[in-house]
Amino acid sequence: MRKSVVWLSACLLVVGLLSGCGGKKEDSGATSSPSVSNSSDSAAGGKSELSGKIKFLSHRTDYVNDGTFDKYIAKFKEKYPKAEIELEALTNYANDIKVRLTTGEAGDVLMLDPGIANKDLPTYFEPLPDSLFENAYFPDQRAWEGKRYAITTGVNTMGIVYNKKAFQKAGITKVPTTLDELYQAAQKLKDAGIIPLYMNYGAQWPMGNWFEGAGWWVAGDPKLHDRMVQSDTPFTLTDAYEKMINIARTFVEKGWVEPDLSTNNWEMSKGEVASGKAAMYFLGNWVIPQVIGAGAKPEDVGFFPFPYDNSGGPYNAPLGGDYYIGVSKNSKNKELAIKFLEFFVKESGYQDQSGFMPIYKDKQPNVPQLAEFKSFKPNLIEELPGDPRFNEIANKAEIPLWTGAVAQQLVKAKDVKAELDKLNKKWADAKKALGY
């Protein structure tokens, strides 16, 4: 299953991609959410008398099919034995949930449509209690006019996911901590008959990691997109865009990526990395359970920050939310729905099982690969709510950000600087046409 990468956090606001992703959302100016009246439990650690039936809508068809969600519900019912939870997973969630919201058939607890505008949240969702957001990441990403309507279900970062056995076979004895060391490791892997890095050029969407998905955090500027709104030369405001594209171009030119760049081999690539036929991904921590699910032993999968220069680190890395979860405004049992939502994000184990970082800042990840990643002491750059005009200008300019298409073109371009100038020109023209 394809899940969100940090860079995809604004994708559906721009082009309506049908994939799961958290969100770089428009700035609502929210600072707090109202408390919602909740029934208290009968005793500390005891069973609650709260009862009724609610429906939980999700994008995780795999967790419905393999019984994972059933286990969560069984655990929830230990505390709320009179509660009934109905499950439904939508295969084409990002598209289907739009229809469900419109028809009032979105259940009681649901993952948000990633493309819904924050200003529309009050129409479809119930405000959540302030207590839920204490010490949480991204508390105001899904807020409007002082009320918070959803909380993220997991925290993603991005880096190099690698097969330790492949590294050993190639004679790589230490994790690369400079760009030159990354290049040297790639050549050793190639010499050993291993695909150094599965770029998934043919799948397209992963390519955004090398451009629009990386610019803000490589630059160390979570408000970069807001500054781009004010600029007529946004793609050269920082050297981060050109830097990352040139690294990608080097990998392609040196033959350090998959040999077939024209075919979408995303599903196959997971087996290649799991088996050690390929060594690395440049993706988010969300892919780690998928590599393990494809056959890798957990202890053979590692994760380290992307060394985008030769400073030796510490390097910047992004922090972004995955799908956000909320309670339907049309729910007939909002008290139970909020209790289930709280259980889901705090007690179910969903974040560990899905390879996410905890959503609360005082919690440590139980995923060993995340502990390895954090041992390199990266500068974690937290995404912030963004200016909605960024997406509006990109749409007007017909620059297909968040699809991977721009990065594909730049990787194959004869002159990167000339292509960036063209993007700047399109942007400036669109900005002028919109009156910004």
Image (cartoon, rainbow, N blue to C red):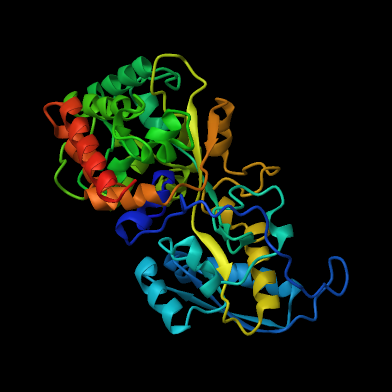
Q: Is residue 203 visible?
A: no
Query: Within the image, what quadrant is residue 114 found in?
Result: bottom left
Q: Is residue 293 left or right of residue 335?
A: left
Image quarter of the C terminus: top left
**In this picture, residue 396 sits left or right of residue 26:** left
Residue at 57% across, 45% down: 357
Quadrant of residue 375 in the image? top right
**Residue 98, percent from left and from top:** 39, 73
Estimate the x, y position of residue 178 in percent, counting from the top left.
Answer: 41, 17
Locate the N terminus and report the quarter of the image it occupies.
bottom left
Q: Which one is nearer the viewer's eye here, 113 or 387? A: 387
Q: Could you tell whether 404 is left or right of 169 in the image? A: left
- The front one of 183 and 112 is 112
Is the residue 173 above or below the residue 54 in the image? above
Q: Residue at x 56, y 56 (%)?
A: 152
Relative to 426, residue 133 above or below: below
Q: Residue at x 66, y 82 (%)?
A: 333
Residue 112 appears in view: yes
